[in-house]
């Protein structure tokens, strides 16, 4: 379903004229097509978890093809994403969306920027940075990853001479799979180059490139909101456990259309971190059971998505240890915790 809708949407893009007057049509096309194509991303994500099909070869083929079509290095991502699930909300070993401590060099820098430009401008900057370039920078350099893996960490090579940390994000055992991922990307890039010669670079840029940016923006928005908010703690090595980290995931209300197109990835994500082998079509029932049996443990924030995204972008900057010593919270929350 996701692939069929995506191909149909891309087909519409081939009919839009390459004129400045058609800019509104191109923006609408990019938004709709990128949103629809996000469903293919989610299916590939499910394949990476071995939750899509009982035949692992079919599953791997589907995930590899879909992610390669979206310029995602499938096997490299599969490895790093497994690390994310194993170390969710861990301040040192977390693999993505790891906030800086307030007293770190990065934390002091960001606090200085925040104090100079204010939360409104900082929120605008954070939204643009995360949604526009966050995903490519993550793939290329491991941006927002934990300190245990060194910096940078690239999804395209594990041989960088300065990629030194306590742990290897991409050990030598996955090098061949990383190369296979790169071959998938090269094949897709070759298709785009040939299409540019056959049609035009501008046509390919508009038909493929614009929706690509929207797919990436959805991906970052989902993951950002799944693991970040003013009341969501992160934990250092001495306090973190797998269960504590996994249960800091939050479900949010994306509405029936987005939940249909994206297979409920943002509204059933707590159960996904409890058991990532549950397929999306069973995740709603699993989520309902979790909320019924463990209402105090399953996070669900009814805040509208645009409001929550702005709150996270403008207020979730650096973390400090809670007065109780149990977890690190984003700083605007520290004062309210101290008052309780």
Image: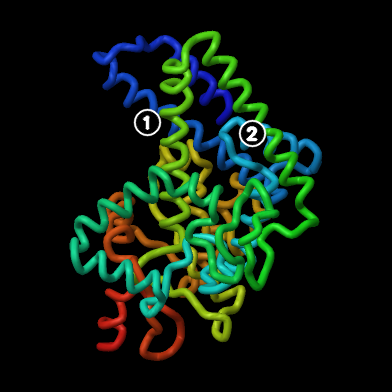
Q: Nearer the viewer, mark 2 or mark 1?
A: 2
Where on the picture, by quarter, is residue 169?
A: bottom right
Q: How is the image coloured?
A: rainbow
Q: Report whether residue 155 is seen.
A: yes
Vertical placement of residue 325 versus 262, above or below: below
- How many labels, in total? 2
How far across and down, in percent of the image, does residue 117 sit?
Answer: 19, 61
> Residue most toward the bottom?
324
Q: Nearer the viewer, residue 288 or 84?
A: 84
Q: Report whether residue 293 is seen.
A: no
> Label 2 belongs to which residue?
185
Labels 2 and 1: the sequence-earlier one: 1
How far across and down, in percent of the image, does residue 123 sit?
Answer: 26, 56
Q: Quadrant of the N terminus?
A: top right
Where on the picture, by quarter, is residue 170?
A: bottom right
Vertical placement of residue 298 versus 6, above or below: below
**Which residue sits at x=53%, y=42%?**
263
> Label 1 belongs to which residue?
31
Check disc 2 and report its element: helix, strand or loop: helix
Check disc 1 and report its element: helix, strand or loop: helix
Q: Nearer the viewer, residue 310 or 160?
A: 160
Q: Is residue 92 left or right of residue 176?
A: left
Q: Quadrant of the C terminus?
A: bottom left
**Which residue sits at x=65%, y=73%?**
166
How far across and down, in percent of the image, does residue 244 sit?
Answer: 55, 76
* CB under 8 Å between discs 2 and 1: no
Q: CA distance from mark 2 to mark 1?
A: 23 Å
Vertical placement of residue 243 versus 31, above or below: below
**Which residue sits at x=47%, y=71%?**
295
Q: Nearer the viewer, residue 91 or 322?
A: 91
Vertical placement of residue 189 versus 340, above or below: above
């Amino acid at each position: 379903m996701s692939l069929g809708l995506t191909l149909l949407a891309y087909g519409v893009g081939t009919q839009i004229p390459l004129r400045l007057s058609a800019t509104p049509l191109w923006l609408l096309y990019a938004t709709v097509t990128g949103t629809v194509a996000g469903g293919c991303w989610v299916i590939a994500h499910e394949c990476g978890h071995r939750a899509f099909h009982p035949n692992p070869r079919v599953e791997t083929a589907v995930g590899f093809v879909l992610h390669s079509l979206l310029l995602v290095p499938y096997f490299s991502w599969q490895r790093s994403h497994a690390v994310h699930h194993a170390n969710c909300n861990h301040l040192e070993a977390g693999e993505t969306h790891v906030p800086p401590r307030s007293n770190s060099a990065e934390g002091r820098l960001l606090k200085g920027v925040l104090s100079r430009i204010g939360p409104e401008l900082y929120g605008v900057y954070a939204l643009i940075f995360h949604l526009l370039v966050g995903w490519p920078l993550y793939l290329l350099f491991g941006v927002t990853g934990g300190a245990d893996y060194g910096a940078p960490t690239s999804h395209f090579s594990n041989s960088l001479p300065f990629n030194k940390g306590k742990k290897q994000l991409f050990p030598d055992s996955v090098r061949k799979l990383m190369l296979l991922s790169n071959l998938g990307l090269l094949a897709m890039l070759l298709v785009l180059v040939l299409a540019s010669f056959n049609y035009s670079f501008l046509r390919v840029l508009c038909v493929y490139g614009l929706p690509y940016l929207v797919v990436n923006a959805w991906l970052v928005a989902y993951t950002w909101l799944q693991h970040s908010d003013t009341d969501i703690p992160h934990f250092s090595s001495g306090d973190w456990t797998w269960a504590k980290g996994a249960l800091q995931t939050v479900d949010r209300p994306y509405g029936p259309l987005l939940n249909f197109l994206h297979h409920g990835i943002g509204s059933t994500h707590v159960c996904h971190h409890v058991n990532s082998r549950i397929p999306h079509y069973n995740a709603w029932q699993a989520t309902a059971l979790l909320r019924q049996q463990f209402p105090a443990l399953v996070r669900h924030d009814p805040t509208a998505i645009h409001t929550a995204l702005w709150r996270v972008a403008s207020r979730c900057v650096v973390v400090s240890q809670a007065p109780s010593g149990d977890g690190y919270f984003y700083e605007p929350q520290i004062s309210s915790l101290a008052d309780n």
